[in-house]
Each structure stands twice: as structure tokens, then as C-alpha cells.
Image (cartoon, rainbow, N blue to C red):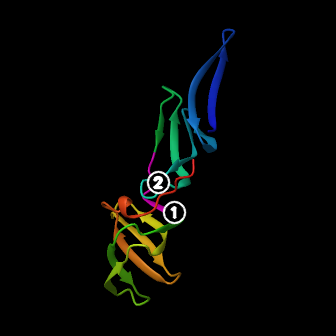
Amino acid sequence: MRTNELVEYSNGKLTELFSIEDLESLQRTNEQTFAGLMSSRDELVGDVQHDYPFTVSLKDHEVHMKIPPKQYIGFPSTALATIKGYRVSPQNDTVAYTIKKGTAVTVDTLYRPQGIVRLIVSDSIVVRAATRNLADKLRHNSAG
């Protein structure tokens, strides 16, 4: 696991100011703040995503990660149980749709504020499903 540490050399000694696991980018935004992106696993299928924004206060060296409200996942999965949702058509009509156990799906985009995820079935059927209790119905990324 990659860990990045920012240290300060002062009065003849090194002091760790903060550390971040899986740092993707870091830049100073002003005199008192660093900001960047870090990697973490999403809560739906546990796939590693590289777009979690964070800030670091240089006053107290506190790291604050933010959860993106909309996040592209793009993880191929399998329905471990029946998933109920709504098929989205090109005309923006929504029709109730059931994804059967064993069906291959792609977890496309997670919309956290709305509590929904966009699933793609058979490369062409787009289904929106509620994220509540959905994590147990999808195969997770078990790679370490």
C-alpha cells in the first residue's frame, strides 16, 4: 500500500505533518491549504476509485476526504440476487425492470445524493436502482 508523508525539517529534526494513503495528486491551493485527489474503495462494490478529493489544513495538519456526489465506477459485476430498478429509455421513460440473479452487469455511475446507481445490462440496457441494500446483491472487487 502506498503511503505518502509530508515531513518538516526544523531545529535539526524531522517531524511528520500528515500522511495520506494512495495519494494521486497534491497541490497548494493557498497559504494554509493543500488539496488533491486520493484513491479509495467505493462502498457499493469495493472497487478502487482514484477521484476522492481531499484537503489538508496547514494550521493543524488535518486531512479531510470528501466523498464525490457523482462517481463513475465502471466495474463489471454479477447480480448475486434479484435487483429491482427502472429501465431508462432514450425517451427518458422509466419502466420497472428486474435484473435476475446471475446476470452480468456493469456498475456504471453512482449518484450518492439521490441514492441511486446506474447499472448496464447486456451493453445496452440502462437500469437505475436504489443503492440501499444493493451492496449485498452485487459481486465485489475482492482483489487486494
- Residue 139, percent across and down? 45, 62
Dot 1 or dot 2: first in sequence order is 2
User: What is the x, y in percent for residue 100?
Assistant: 37, 77
Q: Please tell me which residue is depicted at 38% across the width and 73% down the height of the picture.
A: 101
* Residue under the point 33% across and 72% down: 82
Give neighbour class at mark 2: few <14, some 14-19, many 20+ (Cα, 10 Å).
Answer: some
Q: Is residue 41 magenta?
A: no
Q: Are marks 1 and 2 in contact (CB under 8 Å)?
A: yes
Q: Nearer the viewer, residue 14 or 31?
A: 14
- Looking at the picture, tell me which residue is in the foreground, 88 or 68: 88
The secondary structure type at the circle numbered 1 is: strand
The label number, if any, that marks residue 42 in the structure image: 2
Rendering quarter of residue 20? top right
Comparing 94 with 6, the one in front is 94
Segment tinted magenta in the rendering: 66-71
Q: Amino acid at mark 1?
A: Ile
Residue 14 occupies quadrant: top right
Q: In the visual, does 48 lie left or right of 102?
A: right
Image position of 128 (left or right of 37): left
Task: Residue at 59% x, 22% y: name it.
Answer: 16
- Up-down: is 86 above or below 138? below
- Looking at the picture, does residue 70 appear above or below residue 58? below
Query: What residue did someone put label 1 on?
Result: 73
Which residue extends farthest top? 11
Q: Main secondary structure of the magenta part?
A: loop
Residue at mark 1 to residue at mark 2: CA–CA distance:
8 Å
Residue 123 rendering spot, x and y as whole percentages: 53, 81
Residue located at (31% from left, 60% from top): 133
Q: How many marks?
A: 2
* Amino acid at pointer 2: Asp
